[in-house]
Image (tube, rainbow, N blue to C red):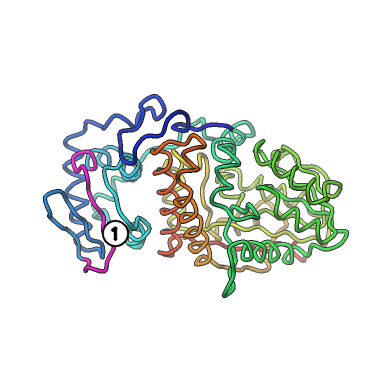
Amino acid sequence: MRTAPGTAGAAAEPGSAPDAGRWPGLAEVPDVPARALVAKRIFLAAVRGLRVRVHLPGGRVVGGGGFGDPVMRIVRPDEFYRRIGADGLIGFGEAWMTGAWDADDPTGVLTVFARRLDRLVPKPLQRLRRWAVAVRPVDEENTPSGARGNISRHYDLSNDLFALFLDETMTYSSALFEPGDELADAQRRKIDAVLDAAAVGAGTRVLEIGTGWGELALRAAGRGAEVVTITLSEEQRTLARRRFEEAGVADRVDVRLCDYREVSGTYDAVVSVEMIEAVGERYWPAYFAAIDRALAPGGRACVQSITMADDRMRAARDTWTWMHKYVFPGGLIPSTEAIDDALAEHTRLRVVQRRDFGPHYAETLRLWREGFLARAEEVERLGFDATFRRMWEFYLAYCEAGFRAGYLGVSQLTLARRVR
């Protein structure tokens, strides 16, 4: 098992101080009294207009919400304000990780904040944003070598960890639900929609960019297709290969440890599910150009992508967030406008069909989060400490809130060559 910070050794109690050896920098509370005071004033002013009830020590309650609204508990106010004063939203997430704030329904709390994210900080102070937010580290640049490291930090944590909260298909992307669906049913429906969009059938030569743990390639092979699927994760390749062998389709699926920039050959269909978010804005042209080069005349591609509004994407493009620091280094969620621009400027491809289903991702994440929390003892036995478990809960709740608030969306984009 590959380990990330905080994954080795005995587990800590939830909310206890992080182990300084495993979580360098997190165990020490920033000493920024002036910035903490400003953060306190901004935070308390912001929550007074929100439908969330903030409980402070001593019984004080702040917030415009009623008794049915989500409750946020500030457990250690001094630490909480110092962390957000020093590091903004990164500090807000870190304060959850250390237990400086807590909530029975973190998704509910975060959804309220996500709906008002653009208005939480007063407009005069928003002009100072460029000096207040962190800049992305150079070592997270998605060069061929950097991309391997970024992918490994997340996907090579442990296959066993992901198996605890994903469904039997081991699919780590938004499902597509119909009434009465179990999660596995909805995941297979999503995959079938991607394969249908790319016209995958018997004899189709398929390139998949981003293997995951192999379910899409399995279903494509089940249709009689010949599949080349690529990944940068050694852990994913190992499990995917085993699944292909056990399903009896190893002769029709070739799984390679390969960067999308290294792909050769031509294919009737190219599919890529929630891979583009890890590519980085600088490399979107190369990503789409690789799809264009690989696609045979008359072929179709389907790309599933998480999306955000174009103005929000442009505001976030150069910042370093809690998500980058702890979960997905090097990534950026595109807007559909940015995808259209990259296609128009660097390829012969255009979007010919689009399916949006953001609320389905919120439901997918809810089920993942519930599954993760229900298996907390097993997560601990894998060697992931309490700080990691709080981090992972926050990650899943944070993402779910983004989709529930409409801040994030997800789209399946069918691509075909422009007709001259």
The tally of labels here is: 1
Picture coordinates of residue 26, whole percent (x, y): 34, 32
For mark 1, does the 10 Å Cα neighbourhood hold few (<14), some (14 to 19), or many (20 or more) residues? few
Q: Quadrant of residue 234?
A: top right
Which segment is the magenta one?
65-80
76 lies left or right of 95: left
Q: Quadrant of residue 12?
A: top left
Given the current orientation, which residue lies at the most extreme bottom position? 179
Query: Badge 1 is on which residue?
Result: 119
Instruction: Decide which of 409, 52 is in the foreground and name it.
Output: 52
Instruction: Decide which of 415, 41 is in the foreground and name it.
Output: 41
Q: Quadrant of residue 28?
A: top left
Q: Quadrant of the N terminus?
A: top right
Q: Secondary structure at mark 1?
A: helix
Picture coordinates of residue 387, whole percent (x, y): 39, 38
70 lies left or right of 250: left
Magenta stretch encompasses residue 128: no
What residue is drawn where x is 26% and y is 55%?
A: 72
Picture coordinates of residue 342, whole percent (x, y): 62, 53
What residue is drawn where x is 42% and y is 54%?
A: 397
Q: Amino acid at mark 1?
A: Arg
43 lies left or right of 345: left
Picture coordinates of residue 271, whole percent (x, y): 71, 55
Magenta stretch encompasses residue 73: yes
What residue is drawn where x is 58% and y is 38%?
A: 158
